[in-house]
Amino acid sequence: MTEVEARSATSRLHDQLEAIVEVLRRHDDEGPLPAGSQAELRRQLDELHPADIAFILESLPLDDRLAVWQLVKADRDGEILLEVSDAVRESLIADMDRQEILAAVEPLDADELADLVEDLPTAMLPELMASLDTQQRQQVQSALSYGDDQVGALMDFEMVTIREDVSLEVVLRYLRRWDELPAQTDKLFVINHDNLLTGVLPLHWLLVNPPEKMVSAVMAPDVNTFHPTDDAYDVAQAFERYDLVTAPVVDESGHLIGRITIDAMVDVIREESESEALSRGGLREEEDIFASVWASLKNRWAWLAINLVTAFIASRVIGLFEGSIERLVALAALMPIVAGIGGNSGNQTITMIVRALALNQITTESAKRLWRKELTVSLLNGLVWGGVIGVVAWLLYDSASLGLVMTAAMTLNLLLAAFAGVGIPVLMTKFGRDPALGSSVLITAMTDSGGFFIFLGLATIFLM
Amino acid sequence: MTEVEARSATSRLHDQLEAIVEVLRRHDDEGPLPAGSQAELRRQLDELHPADIAFILESLPLDDRLAVWQLVKADRDGEILLEVSDAVRESLIADMDRQEILAAVEPLDADELADLVEDLPTAMLPELMASLDTQQRQQVQSALSYGDDQVGALMDFEMVTIREDVSLEVVLRYLRRWDELPAQTDKLFVINHDNLLTGVLPLHWLLVNPPEKMVSAVMAPDVNTFHPTDDAYDVAQAFERYDLVTAPVVDESGHLIGRITIDAMVDVIREESESEALSRGGLREEEDIFASVWASLKNRWAWLAINLVTAFIASRVIGLFEGSIERLVALAALMPIVAGIGGNSGNQTITMIVRALALNQITTESAKRLWRKELTVSLLNGLVWGGVIGVVAWLLYDSASLGLVMTAAMTLNLLLAAFAGVGIPVLMTKFGRDPALGSSVLITAMTDSGGFFIFLGLATIFLM
């Protein structure tokens, strides 16, 4: 075993990225790379896995990225386009001409093609579809007929199917006629003459059972079967729960139409959590870190504008009480504390609830308990921390009644935060919306305006 | 094919949860379940996959959860404990006596045992370790010697190893002697007489190649080999990139010591994204939604306290300018807008950067470009939105100079937000800390105090 092979695979990728950046950096800025460097880069790239090239392209700023992209062998373009994030994919496709795009997609399977189609120039689609054979075209059209978040858009059509009335020996001989089994095949699908799925035969069982046994005697009825209209994230969770590697997809009457593989499901899990993290603050998921300033602005403006409106409302709430603030300027200094703690606490609650909702763990029954629990936690937090800050305010401004108002306002605002922290995501879900979307902006808006109103209102009533 | 089998596996679980809740609800509150209901629940539970029982336990409030837990067959307890989240696991173990715990862990493998050990009562460990055979004990100790985030803690020891100087026929015959192959086996590990890993033989290749071929002629040198000290998340990303199902773990000199499977890596990916989402707002990951009020308070207090300090600082910043606010009370109403928009924009930036850092996509080289880009985006956002709100302030308070101060303050605070949004996570990473930890609280603290200072400072200079 050589030195290199004993090295861990995790450190390899970063070294490769560094090596490529080094070559790119050797001749600073401007102008195309000299032929020598181009050849060197090309050699490095040829040795890399498509997913690694994708990683490197994503890690490079746009100009370097396109320089590297030009050096990738044309017949690998398709696989690489499949691996990069949407934003980077757009930037690469924008750099390719018609001929290059057609060459890139040529080696792809129907499901992969369907994945890329939406990012290709619309004008090219007729030409592209015409270049496919009938079966492929049907498969692409089928995949395109489902939403991005449905299993039908993610399934592939490469499966090994067998009949149940043959012996394992026959199956083994049949498999030897394949050059290669479809990637990640861990089970064979058993179908009858009507193409109805009657069971699955894990490769393991094929290997440990005596060859003279019949498939029907060894196969398992497959309980983990999915429909093309199933929600992809639900299916991904099933893969996670049951440790699946592949699973059959059947239509309403049980006909086998495709299969789902773990690698597609891992992507779904990753994308779901990423888009959840991003959408919380009102970011769309498609921004890559080297996106142009313009793309970044577009990505962020919508929620900044919403935030501007909510901040303006909070400002007008304060405006209502300008008279009180003029008479007791300490209110201006204390009010952000009430609003800030409320926002922090509300965000903690909403994060917990959004997560539980994503995992389908909240029933009508349990929702009531959750309100009760969150409200109790907030009440205690409000009394304790509100009490602390009330004492500080008392000492600082030498007014016990100001301290009391502070404590009361903190407690009430924390209760509001808990109420909204559970209520917003539960309502969003009820109306079929993504509960994470902008949740942070919304809860902060409520606790800001609410906090100012509660605090300044109480102060006006009791201190003026 | 029956009706039931053609149903999708995703809808099954929710129905099962509902059915169990229904039985639990039939006799409201208080008192143990009648024997009839117990028998019914037991029957339902017996049919469920351990992961499904885990899901159901997680979805039930504590009292219901323990009622159901008591009805689960003792020999399944171990598998189920492995599947539930840490917080729920604690609640279940707290409900078990010594005898039950020993019975539950008895059927587990070394790596599974190592996973549970830290949640078991410390007093039980000597007894538990004594009950293992020498090899198992060594494996458990080995697994415990690595950090939770290292591959060594997650690898298992169930592998099929073969020699390279035999024919595929021999391998096939050897496999038939197994009752069952280790779960998720997709490749056999080829070792020499020194236990050095010399290659891997995917089951696919075993199946499609003629049986008379030698292992050495068919096997692949395995490039995706990991070390027990590798970071689990890095390895999970490699699994994702290369679509791996299993991979060998070797020591420094290339001896095969274990293997890693995709199901463990999916858990790592899920946990990493969850803990990222939670830690952003300063939550630890161990809170389950039905945690007691006390557990929730403990989980949330640390960051609420930090937030209290930062809010207090912001309040003192305002206190510095009480004189100005007294003279121009409009400042009090406008200042939260400057702080709020800064916080929102800073959170957008920090979310992007934390994500890119988690994927290792930021090099020293690219960090500079990122600052530049984020600062440009902020400058434009500041001028545009700051301009808008400046005009609004001008019209509202009939003071052009107040509008100008507002615009300038917004722009400067957005630049501060961009600067801190890139700087905080990059610095955290440099010092080896988790860049997501409390990032939202920290950035908000900076944009609050900073925003108040900038706005009130400018107002004091130019308007007083």
Image: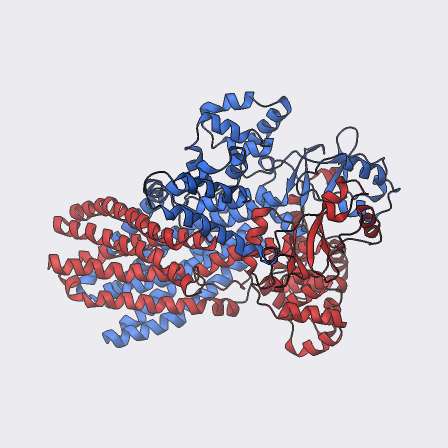
Chain colours: A red, B blue
Q: Is residue B365 above or below residue A203?
A: below
Residue at image location 24% in from the left, 60% down from the top? A452
**In the depicted view, which residue is nearer to us: B15 or A267?**
B15
Above or below, A447 against A10 in this view is below
- The total of numbered circles placed on residues is 0
Q: Position of residue B300 (x, y in %)?
A: 35, 45
Q: Position of residue B185 (x, y in %)?
A: 70, 42
Nearer to me, B422 or A459: A459
* Residue A119 visible in rendering: no
Place of residue A358 in the rendered image (x, y in percent of width and height, measured from the top left)? 47, 55
Asked if residue B16 is positioned above or below residue B127 in the image, the reply reads: below
- Quadrant of the drawing holding the N terminus of chain B: bottom right
In the rendered structure, the answer to whether residue B11 lies left or right of residue B380 reads right
Q: Please give the name of the residue rendered at 73% of the width and 69% of the height, measured from the top-left corner.
A: A136
Q: Quadrant of residue B92?
A: top left
**Quarter of the image that includes the C terminus of chain B:** bottom left
- Whether residue A349 appears in this view of the structure is yes
Q: Residue furthest front?
A: B36
Residue B15 percent location from the top left of the image: 49, 53
